[in-house]
Image (cartoon, rainbow, N blue to C red):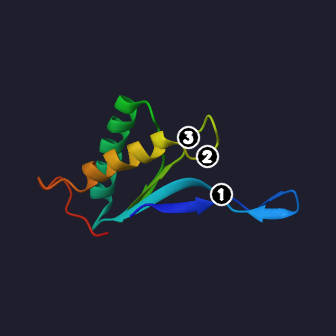
Amino acid sequence: MWQPCFRAHQRTNNSQRRAAHRIQRTVRFDNFREALGVIRKVGELAETEGHHPDISFGWGYATVSLNTKKIKGLHENAFIMASKIDRLLDRPDGFLDHKQ
């Protein structure tokens, strides 16, 4: 599940507001090889779509973070890309056998 990530509070006219500036999803795996395989597939998708996430991974996990860098925040394109990544991660053809 994608989670919103918030910036520090921003003050505008004596009021504070919190605005999500990115969304991220972490997926758990049984080993490093599975996490690396997912990162490669997400990278291929990102190149095809021209929307490049920030990615971190290690033994047993991969975290994908999306924002729209030109506006330093969230735009509809980030949510479209998140949906495409979800479809990639949740494919029923057995591409991934992962824990959420």
Amino acid carrying label 2: it is Gly
The answer to whether marks 2 and 1 mark residues whose Cβ atoms lie closer than 8 Å is yes
Residue 13 or residue 66, whichever sits in front: 13
Mark 3 surroundings: few (<14), some (14-19) or many (≥20) residues within 10 A = some
- In space, the residues marked 2 and 1 are separated at their CA atoms by 9 Å
What residue is disc 3 on? 68
Where in the figure is residue 19, as x and y percent of width and height? 65, 57
Tell me the quadrant of the picture where the N terminus can be found.
Answer: bottom left
Where in the figure is residue 43, as x and y percent of width and height? 37, 39
Q: Which residue is drawn at 56% across and 40% down?
A: 68
Say the numbered circle drawn on residue 35.
none
Residue 81 or residue 54, whichever sits in front: 81
Q: Which residue is drawn at 64% across and 42% down?
A: 72
Say the numbered circle drawn on residue 73.
2
Disc on the earlier residue, 3 or 2: 3
Disc on the earlier residue, 3 or 1: 1
Disc on the earlier residue, 2 or 1: 1
Where in the figure is residue 28, as x and y percent of width and height? 34, 67
What residue is disc 1 on? 19
Q: In this view, does 39 lie above or below 69?
A: below
Q: Is residue 47 left or right of residue 29?
A: right
Mark 1 surroundings: few (<14), some (14-19) or many (≥20) residues within 10 A = some
Residue 59 visible within the image: no
Amino acid carrying label 1: it is Ala
Residue 63 or residue 80, whichever sits in front: 80
Amino acid carrying label 3: it is Thr
